[in-house]
Image: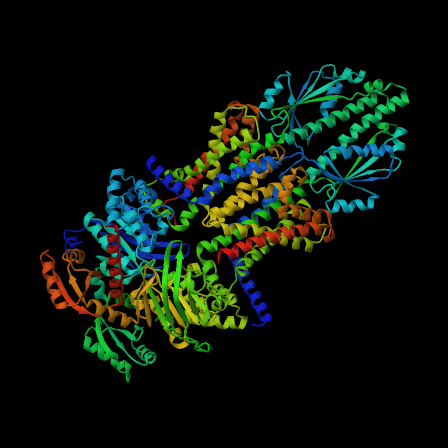
Amino acid sequence: MNLRRVAAVASKEWREVTRDRMFLLLAFVMPAIWMFVFGYGLVLDVEHISFVVVDRDHSPLSRDYLYRFYQSRYFDFQEALAGEGDADVWLQSGRARAVIIVPEKFQERLLSGQPAEVQTLIDGTFPLRADITKSYVIAINNAFNQELLVDFLARTRGLSRGEAQRRTSPLGIEVRYLYNEEVRSTWSTVPALIMFSLMVGSPLLTALGVVREKETGSIYNIYSATVTRLEFLVGKLIPYVMISAVNVAVLWLMAVLLFAVPFKGSLWLFIASSILFVLTSTGIGLVVSLLVSTQQAALIITVVVSTVPTILFSGLIVPVSSLSRASQFQAHLFPGMYYTNITRGTFLQNVGLAVLWTDILALAIYAVVLGTIGYHLFTKRPRT
Amino acid sequence: MDQPEILTPPPAQVVRVRGFVKQYKQHIAVSGIDLEIHKGEIYGLIGPDGAGKSSLMKAIAGVLTYESGTVEVFETMIDTERAAERVKQRLGFLPQGLGLNLYPDLSVDENIDFFARLRLVPEHELAERKARLLAMTRLDKFRARAMKNLSGGMKQKLGLICTLIHEPELAILDEPTTGVDPVSRRDFWAILAELLQERGMTVLVSTAYMDEAERFHRLSFLSSGKVLASGTPAEVHALVPGSMVTFEATPQLEAISRLKTGCTQVEALGPVLRVFTEDTNPVSAAQAITSYLGDIEPQQLHVDKLDLEDVFVALLLREADQPPPSPELPTASVSSVNHGLAIEAKELIRDFGTFRAVDRVSFQVKPGEIFGLLGANGAGKTTVIKMLNGILPPTGGEGWVAGEDMKTAGGAIKERIGYMSQAFSLYLDLTVEENIRLFAGIYGLDRRATNERFAWIVSMAGLQGYESSLTVRLPMGVRQRLALGCALVHQPRVLFLDEPTSGVDPIGRRHFWDILSRLAREEGVAILITTHYMSEAEHGDHLALMYAGRIVAEGSPAAMKAQVEREAGQLLEVVTDQPGLALRQLERAGFAGIALFGAQLHLLSRDPAQDEVRIRESLASEGLHVLGAAIRPLSLEDVFVHRVMALERRDRETTKGAAA
Amino acid sequence: MKPADRLVVWCRRLTVMTRKELVQLLRDIPLMAFLIYSFTLSVYVTGNGIQTQLRNAGLLVYDADRSLSSRELVSRFHLPYFRFDGELIHADEGFRRLDRGRSMMVLDIPARFHEALVSGEPTAVQLLVDTTNAPQGLSAAGYAARIVGQFGQESVLARNGLAASSSTTVPMIVSDHRVWYNQDQNETWFESISHLLRMITIFAVLLPAAALVREKERGTVEQLLVSPLTPVQIMLPKVVAMTLMILGATAVALFGVMQPVFGVPIRGSLFLLFSLTALFIVATAGIGVFASTVTKNQAQVGMMTLLVVAPILLLSGIFTPMETMPAWVQYLMALSPLRYFIEIATGILLKGVGFDMLWSQALSMGVVGASLFGFGLWRFRRQFQ
């Protein structure tokens, strides 16, 4: 490999990029904007679930019970309905996600030591939301039950409230959260967003690189010169790897300064693996660009190939462990997942090479495979 | 440079091609070509678009695979990428397409640097070579200018510098002059000749301009993937004996149909007819023509030798299985009501930022008239057309097209005009029929009218058999006829054609012009056309020459020639054994405005007899021989070159004056 | 010309131009292959694969008690929510195993756990949870708390002689959840619908944008501009053609994958679904049209559209519920047609509701779409003047 030729290709490419002002601006601004919007916007605490109630009992106890929902920040009270009949309309129109129906004789039954059945109708169109709603309802019910039981024992067994409370003391659970002690969802999304911004943005930088030269004909300068395939591909990639590397730095600073995510691990490890990752993500664009013959196809294929797996299969939100087998397989085919492990590991966990070496190795293999594919796809003496 | 030297001793072979075959999927592009290129010569590949020139050149440059045969370059068999790599340092390759292989956003300097560094040219040598080449091409003033802001001629010269910056032993130039105006083309050949002489380089070059064939030491004429003829220009000339008879005859259409009963090549250039006969004897040739014409009396008849273009056309016609489709123009039901003027431009101005591209341009075109707009690349022709057909709003001035005011009736104008843009602008991924029906629909034709016009276009443009072919697979000449057909789908009253024949072979061009003449003569369509083929401009009824955004001369072709003769004298043609050296010697001796035409030197002279003597003396002092000298009628190319070179000289002097 | 003739010509222009766009699209083989992949295989893999609910959370147990009760408690952590990753010998092994990232939590049961439960002494189990993925960690902790709570409650009842089975004599609220529209909370339904919407969005933005830039780059737009076509007549057919193409692909996804393979119900009116899908595509295409007018080449148009499309895909409520978003994101996303369309699509398919329930969503989408499209059109016209 002759470095002068690599430098010639790289500096030509760099000049072309810097002359396209809008492209250059977008290349730097896009990841930062995404980081900002998603860092603040992609919060995952489900709150304000809108609900309506049907209170058939209208007793002090039923009011006491429902009050717990009104008070909760997880629920957003909409309206008290006269009867169940209207409930469908609320769920159907999407104005309410849940309906809580308190039955008749709610107070009477509970005070007489009998169970009462509270019905919750939940909009199941978005299963995640339905699941969370259900668990919120159960939590409120459990707390209410605990009080009912203390009351009941105190009344029927003639125990003091303290004694009743002691005898019903539930099995405790002490939860200790590790790595993200305050369980801030920004702490876990922001490191993954570094992955997202690079994985979605970088392939597009290189996606049109070779197709454009094929369409205009300037690729013949490369074909007819003594520059080797490897020199050309490396030179072509360098400016975009540099742009992406700058973006890594900017995103890292945003994470640490703006979002105050702690960085507990080794900075060197982070930098080294980031460069490796940037090589693979820009490399994907380059390979697409070698495969297709029109810019339009390159553009659309790159966008779909880089965006969809990154959103779904890279651990950004949905953990890879809860994917189906086929999707887990697909997740392992994209570099995003490995780098998510690395960013979260270095930011939050302070784990080192001993733990992350498999992910880094996977990225390295990925880079080598992409390089090999690129090398073989690019021929200086084509058929047409 | 010198032919006898090449013949003895046995010349060193730079390229040897045997039985070369190139196939793209089902389509055979080149079928069995043999070729040998000797060290130090300019070898020309000539032929229409799609003849296989590019495929052959790419294979020699090692950037394209081929199916069978052998290609040897510098005694290395080019059969794998690895083998090709071994000779690439000794090659320079300029692909087809004006400036397309350059980087538009990079400056002249940066473009050259990139090519040089890619070829590992040492930095100190690079600086020296770059300075020399830039000075030679007069690009040194534009070093910092972005390539996209250069004119066509400048782009072409920059492309040449970039290709030659590593001083290759063999330069492969694919249609370097297509789309470039005559003056820039001339400049290009002069520079190439000079470099050749200095460096002892070998050049393989292709062109679609037949008149450039005279500049090659040896050439091959390709058609449909086969070699029709090869050898020195003289040898090729000898393949087709015959002569060309030119005269005027009225009524012209009747004369043409009579001539076509016996002559294969009949061409109308405005009022003048050019007819090919196989007779080499001037007297009997003239007699033959007169006998075909019968009671029509030819005026101003004279008989000339064939030029190479005529030879190629004859070869192509000989090759073709059948004579080209004679355009039986189906009469369309048009009422050619005369609205007065078809186009009128009054003081049109267009500025781009601080740059004035069009400067107070005024002209008029009558219905049925063919109006030719000539000028160098970047003179403002395309901008004028774009303003008139409503793509670009003018900065100032007024215009009327098809009887409507450009400013107020843009919509009505668009219904009545047809337009063929410089770049092919039909859909390559649609078939011929789909393209025609698309444009019929765009112009609002109903089903019946569409079918009628479809049939008309197919027969007019000779597209029979191509109806369901994808446009991308059509040869260039057919594409251009299709584009013309689409521009005519709605029977426009005014037709704008911007370099419609760039890169089209001579037969295609002649066929194309037949159609245009008929449209103008028979249907009264007004045609405004730009072209870089000066021989084509002879077809125009009225011409205007643009320079730097202004019209600097106008009139009929004859009037324009007469004007130049009045101003600068008669045309003296000098034939020498070494035209390149002779040109420089005469320039040194103080002959201004001398130009190379093919292998001849052209010069305008007020006193031809005395000038001839001075030229002979001047050349003899350098050991150069004059083989002949004669007064010739001016061609439009002479007019163009004379005018533009004079203006450029004046410009240079004023800038020098301003700088001083 | 009479107005009627004018209309005929207008329609004829629209028809031929639309047909041209369709033919061109169909001839781009790699692009078509990719379109088909996106609306079939990709929908299948995603619908099948994505689980947003807790699945397979790796659980390590340190059981210092090794009693009946402790085993009973551990046995309640089971698949599909929890995956048992083994027992730890030493309590301090937990941190190291969590560092490795294979397991997500450690359940630490103290010694004398059984005794305490029987005697009613207060006792507690400890749970270590990896929250590098915060929502996932919280969700796992929530599930665990529910299991432990239930287990605790049962032992309280047993201790107090109130057998859990005879719950008729215990005063407590029995939760009766009815999940409507998707009783089994079948995630493939929602995930395949949201993936379909994702693909519709990407193609609806990119196809017209790329096609318009291509006409500019290849110079064919010049030939159209000198014809009597108005800018609307140049742009609209592209949008119509892309809309037809995407509607076709949607039908393939719906009837070829989602309905037969996943059993996604179509409870509402198909006509309404496809009409509103068409409205959505046109609305979204406005973004692409706009992007094509502010950019000069394919590279720029790609970056520009992606800049806008990524937030739309992530924050419109097809990825995470709208309820999770901060107020400002919800306001911002009022500009995203997808935000309304997710309600419309799930409403028609899963809830089987009609236009009477969806009109407000449809109206909002229409208004946003009309503004986006109108803005795109305005820019498109302006660039040629």
The correct choice, above or below, for C146 with respect to C261 in the image is: above
B645 sits to left or right of A356? left
Q: Nearer the viewer, residue C198 or A26?
A: A26
A93 sits to left or right of B306? right
The correct choice, above or below, for A243 with respect to B321 in the image is: above
The N terminus of chain C sits in image quarter: bottom right
Where residue B25 appears, as percent x and y from the top left, is 41, 54
Where residue A53 appears, as percent x and y from the top left, is 80, 39
B323 sits to left or right of C92? left
Visible in this render: residue B420? no
Where residue A23 appears, as percent x and y from the top left, is 46, 44
Visible in this render: residue A64? yes
For this orientation, the residue located farthest to the bottom is B295
The correct choice, above or below, for B407 with respect to C38 in the image is: below
Where residue A145 appears, as percent x and y from the top left, is 81, 28
Count of number-bearing discs: 0
Q: Nearer the viewer, residue B354 or C311?
A: B354
